[in-house]
Structure formats: C-alpha cells, structure tokens
DNA sequence: AAGTGGTCTAGACCACGGC
DNA sequence: CCGTGGTCTAGACCACTTC
C-alpha cells in the first residue's frame, strides 16, 4: 500500500494532522515532547522515513522543533511579524480602542503621481481619505489613503470614523487584501502635517508610503502616512 | 556507507552544492531543467530518496521548482523582500562596490543600554565598531555595531574596512546569523551624525536600531544606524 | 546505556505531464 | 508511452543528548 493508507491522503500528512490536532486541542503544549519518529512509525504502522518526513514538515511550518539526540518538541506559539494590519487591527491586538478623525473624504482627479502608484491611467478619479489617528488624546499619525474611484466611490459615504477601512473593503467591497510594499524614510513636518500632529514645523517625522495589493495582485490602496518621530516607531523582523 | 560519502558532509548536501554551483556559474539559468532525481541518483551513486531529499531542500530554499510529472527547474531569481542582508551584500545584489570607512574599532564596557539589548550582564565588555558607509562618494549611513567581547574580541583586528562583518562572523567565528528585529524611527542629526553624513545638524534622519540573532536565538549584534532622510529609504513587504 | 533525530539504501508503485 | 516527481518500505548505522 504505497501512496494511500486507507483514504486518499498521504500517510505523512495524516500523521501531521493528528499531531496538529493534539496541539490545537491543548493535549500538547509548547515545550512538550512529541512522539518520537520510532513511536510514530510504530503507532501509525509506517516506516521510519515516513514518520520522519511528517516531523520534518511540521518543523518547516514552525509547529515543532527537533533537537538531535533529545527529541521533537512543540514549538512556542509564533509571534507574527511584518503582518499587514490596519490601524484598527493593530490597536485591537494591543487591547486599545482605535480612534481616528476623518479630515477629508471625497473624490479627486488629476493627482498623477498617485494614479501612477495605483497603476491607473492619468487623470483617473480616486477616493481621497485623510485621517488623523490618535492614541488616548495625543495625535499619532496623519494618513492619506487613495483608492480607485471606479470601484470604491461609495467609500466617501462609509462611516470610516468608526469602522475600519480594511474591514469595510473586505466586507462590503469583496476585496481580499494580500500584501503591501512600504517605503519608509525620514522627513520634516510641513505646516499641515505639523498642525495635525501638534508638533512644530520642521520636526522630524517618519513617512511611510504604502501600496496595498489585493490577492489578485492589483493595487487597491495607496497610503501616505506621517508619524511623529522619536515618539512612535516601526518594528520589522527580517530573516536571513 | 551511510552518513558520509567520502568526506564528512552528507550526500544530499553535496548534491545540492553541485547544483547550486552550476547555477551560480551560469551553466544553469532560470527555467532550465535540473537533472531528475533518477539521474542524480545514478550520477552521485545514491538512492532515489537521497536524490529527492536534495531537490526538496533546494526547493525549500527557493533555488528550484519541482513540477510533478514535468521535472525540476531552476527557479527565477527571487526578489528578496525583508531579507536580512549586510551592507556589503546589499551593494553586491545591486552590482555596486561596497565602500565603508571604519571610524572606531575597540573594546568598551559599561554601556548598559547596549549590554541590555544584547542580554549581557551589566558591565560586560563589548566590541564597538563605528563605520561610515558610502555610495560613490556620498556618505549614506553611519552605523555603530556592538558585539559581545567574550566571543568576538578578535574582531577589532579584522580588516573590516574591506571585508564584510557578516561574512567574517559566518566564516571565521562560526556564527550563523538568522534574523533581526528592527526598530525604525525618525530623529534629527546631532553634531557627530551630521558631521559623518555631511549634513546640517537638526536635519531629519532615519534611525534603525537592530538586534541581530544567531540561529540559536542568541543576540549577536546590536546595530544603531543613521541614514540620510529624504535621500535613502527602506523597503518592506508585509503580508496579511 | 538507552533513546533520539539524521542520513541512507535499493528498490516499489502511484499520479501526472508531455509527446 | 515514457519520464517525472511523490510517496513509501524495512530496515541500517551514525552522532548526539540524557540519564
């Protein structure tokens, strides 16, 4: 019985699934030892290579850690780095209430640099949305979002003061956001930015320009954000 | 002859190396077919499982793509997002010559904030390395690296003006760098930073503080870098 | 010493792709 | 059809960790 054990899925995947379930159910916790490859082979009636293949796959996924000579152990729960999250989601993940004020919400056209970022023809109409983000009572960021008006014109009527832009897009506009490219640099606050962030003109700010793509690789949002320097910072995890 | 073929490295790694070399040498280009697992097994005198293991590893690294029923092919060159790369490697990936000047290279102690970042006891000795990075003739970054002196004291004698810190660590100190946590914010250039970057004091700069970890999750390097704002920026790709 | 993971063999059959 | 990768066997020895 080569490929399939009893149904159609490979034996090594069945083994992985039983282990994953045991972790999700809480029967196995971080640091606990997982059955050894020999025990898995015996219990599941497979060869050592197959049992090993199952463990190797789980390790690649980060579910378990294998230590030579010691055993295989449940890996600590992974922290998500570099995750594309909305302001609302970020606040929620820290247990804080999101708070933002809409400054502008209207249709614009002839902002050629922006339409180029969204790979739209020159002169295209776009939704422009300016918001100031607060933590407690202190302004934290000033963000301007642009979206193609042909699909998202109705956004200007959405209650974005209270609900999340990401959630609105994914719920009401059937858009699945997938990834973003960010460009980060340092600049100085001009008059308008300084005013919204309540800092003096010329003070250093972090500028993040972001193109957010849907899962079909089409650009959906272009965001330019200014963040108070020395007060808030950006965390990134890079891998070799 | 199980583990070793003729020297100490596993057969599957030798196979991977020969394929990698063939790609680096240009004998194999993106899209070209790689020898099939059966051919690899025959040529290298190993079993099919071993040949397959070699290809599986290369696929995980993104070096090749395997298509069932069709074959194994050299993967298109990856665009590296969020990859932990040294300045030297970044320059090399753009076909530019790295150029940096060592300002300081000595042992220090009692910099408690730094030793804390490296999770060293207070008062620990550390190697301090200050460098100015250039592109063409313009200064681009001013970076200060700290490493635990107990293991890396010999670095002060390494020729870091010409060779890469990453390469030196991985080659001469047997350290495998794995990932880094970065903290990015905007600040203003103080006198010393302004001097090295040839900009006026108070100008905005991007500050990146980085803790680089080895594959055993031990912090190895703490880097504080200042980058000219509005001139250079940081790219990040985030996923949802 | 006992147990663990890592590597490896010499094949086998299956499912799939291209000709 | 033939070649490809995917899965799998029933063991083996090695290097390592833990007791």
Image: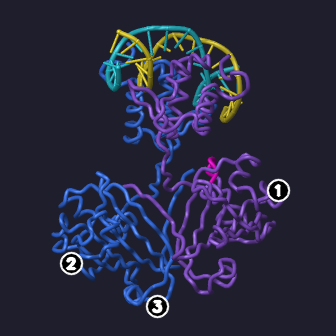
Chain colours: A blue, B purple, C cyan, D yellow
Task: Point out residue B160 in the picture as x, y percentages from the top left corner.
Answer: 76, 60
Q: Earlier in the sequence, mark 3 or mark 2?
A: 2
B125, above or below A239, in the image: below
Q: Identify the element where label 1 is drawn.
A: helix
Q: Nearer the viewer, residue B122 or B28?
A: B28
Q: Which residue is mark 1?
A: B154
- Magenta range: B213-217
Q: Secondary structure at mark 2?
A: strand
Subunit under mark 2: A
Q: Residue at x 63, y 25 (%)?
A: B11
B214 inside magenta stretch:
yes
Same subunit, labels 3 and 1: the answer reads no
Q: Which mark is residue A201?
A: 3
At 81% from the left and 67% from the top, the residue drawn is: B106
Residue of label 2: A106
Visible residue check, residue A162? no
Q: Are marks 3 and 1 in contact (CB under 8 Å)?
A: no
Which quarter of the picture shows residue C6?
top right
């Amino acid at each position: 019985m080569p490929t399939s054990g009893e149904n159609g899925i490979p034996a090594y995947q069945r083994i992985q699934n039983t282990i994953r379930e045991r972790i999700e159910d809480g029967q196995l916790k971080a640091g606990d030892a997982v059955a050894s490859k020999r025990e898995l082979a015996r219990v599941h009636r497979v060869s050592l290579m197959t049992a090993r293949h199952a463990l190797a796959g789980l390790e690649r996924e980060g579910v378990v850690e294998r230590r030579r000579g010691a055993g295989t152990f449940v890996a600590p729960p992974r922290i998500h780095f570099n995750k594309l999250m909305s302001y609302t989601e970020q606040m929620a993940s820290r247990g804080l209430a999101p708070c933002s004020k809409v400054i502008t919400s209207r249709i614009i056209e002839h902002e050629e640099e922006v339409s180029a970022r969204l790979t739209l023809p020159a002169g295209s109409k776009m939704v422009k949305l300016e918001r100031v983000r607060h933590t407690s009572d202190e302004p934290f960021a000033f963000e301007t979002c642009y979206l193609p008006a042909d699909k998202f014109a109705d956004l200007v009527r959405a209650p974005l003061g209270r609900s999340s832009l990401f959630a609105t897009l994914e719920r009401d506009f059937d858009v699945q956001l997938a990834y973003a490219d960010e460009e980060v640099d340092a600049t100085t606050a001009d008059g308008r930015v300084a005013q919204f962030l309540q800092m003096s003109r010329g003070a250093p700010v972090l500028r993040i320009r972001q193109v957010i793509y849907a899962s079909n690789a089409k650009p959906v949002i272009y965001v330019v954000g200014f963040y108070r320097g020395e007060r808030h910072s950006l965390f990134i995890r890079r891998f070799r």
